[in-house]
C-alpha cells in the first residue's frame, strides 16, 4: 500500500515539472471556465500516460532498445512543441486585439475541444518515458508489475495536472478577470515563457 502512494505521489510531482506547467498554462489561457481548464489537465494526463504505455510496450514486452540519443530527440521535440504553442497563442492574441475580439473565446456556446491538451500530453510523454521505463525494467520483477507501476504513476500525473490546470485558469475566469489589459499581459507572458523555455530545451538536447 505504501508503494502505491509513493508511486501516485511520484506521478503527481512529475506533472509539476516546468515544461509541463508552461504548456498547460498556455493552453488554459484559452479558457474562461475552470471546469473546462481542469478537463484540459485530465486530457493532458491521459495523453502523457498513453505515450508512456506505448514506450513501455516497446521496451518491456518487445525488448526494443531505444538509445539515449533518441530520447534527446524526444526532449527536443517537446521544446519545439512549446515554441509552437507560444507562437500560436501570440498570433491568436494579436489577431483578437486587431479585430477587437474577446481575448478568451471559450464562452461555453460550443462543447470545448480537448484534443490539443491530449496531443500535448502525448508529446510530453515521449520526453520522460525513457527514464521511467528504465526504472521499471530495473526495479520490477515482472511485466505486469511494471505496467501497474506505469498506470499508478499515470493516475498521479492526471491528478496533478488536473489540479495545476484548474489553478492556472483561475486568473482567466470570466467571473474573476475584469481587466482586459491584465488578461493580455498574462497571456503574453505565458506565451513568451513557452517560446524561451522551449528554445532552451531544444538547444540543450540537440547539443548534448
Image: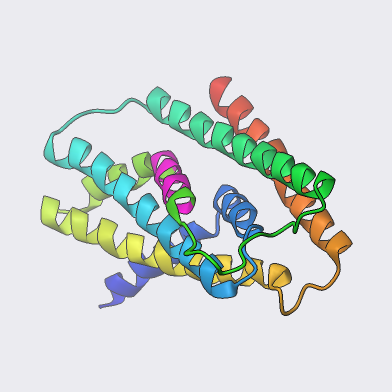
Residue placed most toward the observer, 129 or 77: 77
Q: Main secondary structure of the magenta part?
A: helix
Q: Residue at x 55, y 27 (%)?
A: 205
The x and y percentages for residue 40 are: 49, 61
Find out whether residue 27 is within the magenta segment.
no
- State how the image is colored: rainbow
Quadrant for residue 28, please give it. bottom right
The x and y percentages for residue 11 are: 41, 62
Q: Residue at x 43, y 51 (%)?
A: 115
Quadrant for residue 180, please give it. bottom right
Residue placed most toward the observer, 110 or 78: 110
Quadrant for residue 91, please give it. top right
Let me know if residue 132 appears in the view.
yes
Which residues, given as a range, are shown in magenta? 117-127
The x and y percentages for residue 4 are: 28, 72
Name above or below for residue 68 compared with residue 27.
above
Question: Does 108 sit left or right of 126 as displayed?
Answer: right
Q: Residue at x 78, y 57 (%)?
A: 186
Find out whether residue 124 is within the magenta segment.
yes
Question: Does 170 sit left or right of 7 as displayed?
Answer: right
Question: Does 4 sit left or right of 22 as displayed?
Answer: left
Residue placed most toward the observer, 182 or 24: 182
Q: Residue at x 37, y 51 (%)?
A: 47
Amino acid at each position: 500500500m505504501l508503494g502505491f502512494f509513493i508511486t501516485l505521489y511520484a506521478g503527481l510531482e512529475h506533472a509539476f515539472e516546468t515544461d509541463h506547467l508552461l504548456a498547460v498554462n498556455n493552453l488554459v489561457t484559452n479558457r474562461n471556465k475552470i471546469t473546462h481548464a481542469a478537463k484540459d489537465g485530465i486530457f493532458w494526463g491521459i495523453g502523457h500516460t498513453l505515450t508512456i504505455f506505448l514506450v513501455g510496450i516497446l521496451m518491456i514486452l518487445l525488448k526494443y532498445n531505444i538509445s539515449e540519443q533518441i530520447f534527446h530527440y524526444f526532449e527536443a521535440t517537446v521544446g519545439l512543441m512549446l515554441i509552437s504553442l507560444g507562437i500560436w497563442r501570440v498570433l491568436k492574441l494579436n489577431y483578437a486585439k486587431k479585430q477587437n475580439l474577446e481575448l478568451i473565446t471559450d464562452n461555453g456556446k460550443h462543447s470545448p475541444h480537448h484534443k490539443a491538451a491530449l496531443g500535448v500530453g502525448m508529446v510530453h510523454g515521449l520526453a520522460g518515458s525513457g527514464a521511467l521505463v528504465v526504472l521499471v525494467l530495473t526495479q520490477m520483477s515482472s511485466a505486469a508489475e511494471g505496467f501497474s507501476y506505469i498506470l499508478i504513476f499515470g493516475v498521479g500525473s492526471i491528478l496533478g495536472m488536473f489540479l495545476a490546470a484548474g489553478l492556472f485558469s483561475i486568473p482567466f475566469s470570466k467571473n474573476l478577470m475584469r481587466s482586459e489589459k491584465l488578461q493580455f499581459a498574462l497571456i503574453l507572458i505565458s506565451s513568451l515563457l513557452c517560446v524561451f523555455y522551449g528554445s532552451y530545451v531544444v538547444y540543450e538536447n540537440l547539443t548534448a
